[in-house]
Image: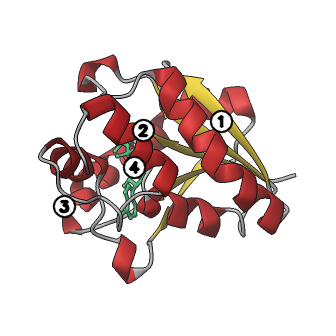
């Protein structure tokens, strides 16, 4: 059984993340979505909220794809999390050139820690490529519509959290 780990902060989960998740289900039998606690990033949504949002969005993808999807919060080293969940691949999304430098370093370092775990990069469909949680939060904070970037449930979550009409 092939197990993949897709790690991130998911603050909140966007249509870009869901696009990558859909593509990842084709590659593995079990997809573990690793939700980083990431206190350092000062997330808008707490861990439980981020996990609940992803779980709600992924149930349909799991049904449609036949791939088992689990959501797993983690606070330790990524490579240790991958070992904990039995993953042989780490899946990451690549947006623009800007992501490349950081991801390139991460792969290099992670390989030195454990070269049996491979990292695979996926690209979202063109209309989802520019979406970033950080910008979604900024737009929502200022009352702009985030309809094209997140699902209706996540949009509701942003409205409730920020008290804007986003
Ligand atoms: P992190 O803190 O690890 O960057 P994110 O939640 O921002 O966490 O992103 C998780 C993963 O999803 C990363 O690999 C990121 O590059 C990818 N990702 C986020 N948004 C998109 C998108 N619009 N298209 C493709 N990949 C994306």
Q: Label 4's element?
A: helix
In this rendering, the answer to whether 108 lies above or below 24 is above
Which residue is rendered at x = 71% and y = 60% of the image?
A: 61
Which comes before the other along the chain, label 1 or label 2?
1
Which residue is rendered at x = 24% and y = 44% of the image?
A: 137
Which comes before the other along the chain, label 4 or label 3?
3
Distance from disc 1 to disc 2, alpha carbons, whole Å, reads 19 Å
Apparent side of residue 40 relative to residue 77 in the rendered image (left or right): left
Please tell me which residue lies in front, 137 or 87: 137
Asked if the residues shown at circle 4 and circle 1 are in contact, with their CB atoms under 8 angstroms apart, the answer is no
The CB of the residue at mark 4 lies under 8 Å from ligand 1:
no
Distance from disc 4 to disc 1, alpha carbons, whole Å, reads 20 Å
Task: Mark 1 vs mark 2: give the one in front.
Answer: 2
Tell me where residue 149 appears, x and y as whole percent.
35, 62
Q: Label 2's element?
A: helix
Distance from disc 2 to disc 4, alpha carbons, whole Å, reads 5 Å
Labelled disc at residue 155: 4
In this rendering, the answer to whether 45 lies above or below 139 is above
In this rendering, the answer to whether 164 lies above or below 149 is above
Residue position for label 2:
157
Asked if the residues shown at circle 2 and circle 4 are in contact, with their CB atoms under 8 angstroms apart, the answer is yes
Task: Mark 2 vs mark 3: give the one in front.
Answer: 2
Which residue is rendered at x = 42% and y = 38% of the image?
A: 157
Which comes before the other along the chain, label 2 or label 3?
3
Which residue ends up furthest to the bottom in the rendered image?
A: 126
Distance from disc 4 to disc 3, alpha carbons, whole Å, reads 26 Å
Distance from disc 2 to disc 3, alpha carbons, whole Å, reads 28 Å
Which comes before the other along the chain, label 1 or label 3?
1
Labelled disc at residue 71: 1
């Amino acid at each position: 059984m092939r197990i993949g780990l897709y790690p991130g902060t998911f603050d909140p989960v966007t249509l870009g993340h869901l696009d990558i998740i859909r593509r990842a289900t084709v590659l593995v039998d079990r997809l573990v979505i690793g939700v980083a606690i990431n206190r350092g990033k000062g997330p808008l949504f707490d861990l439980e909220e981020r996990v609940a949002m992803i779980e709600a969005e992924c149930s349909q993808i799991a049904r449609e794809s036949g791939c088992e999807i689990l959501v797993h919060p983690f606070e330790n080293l990524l490579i240790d999390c991958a070992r904990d969940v039995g993953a042989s691949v780490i899946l990451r999304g690549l947006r623009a050139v800007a992501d490349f430098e950081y991801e390139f370093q991460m792969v290099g370092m992670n390989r030195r820690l454990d070269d049996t775990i491979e990292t695979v990069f996926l690209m979202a469909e063109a209309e989802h490529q520019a979406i970033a949680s950080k910008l979604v939060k900024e737009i929502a904070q200022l009352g702009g519509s985030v309809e094209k970037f997140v699902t209706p449930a996540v949009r509701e979550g942003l409205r409730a959290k920020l008290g804007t009409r986003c």
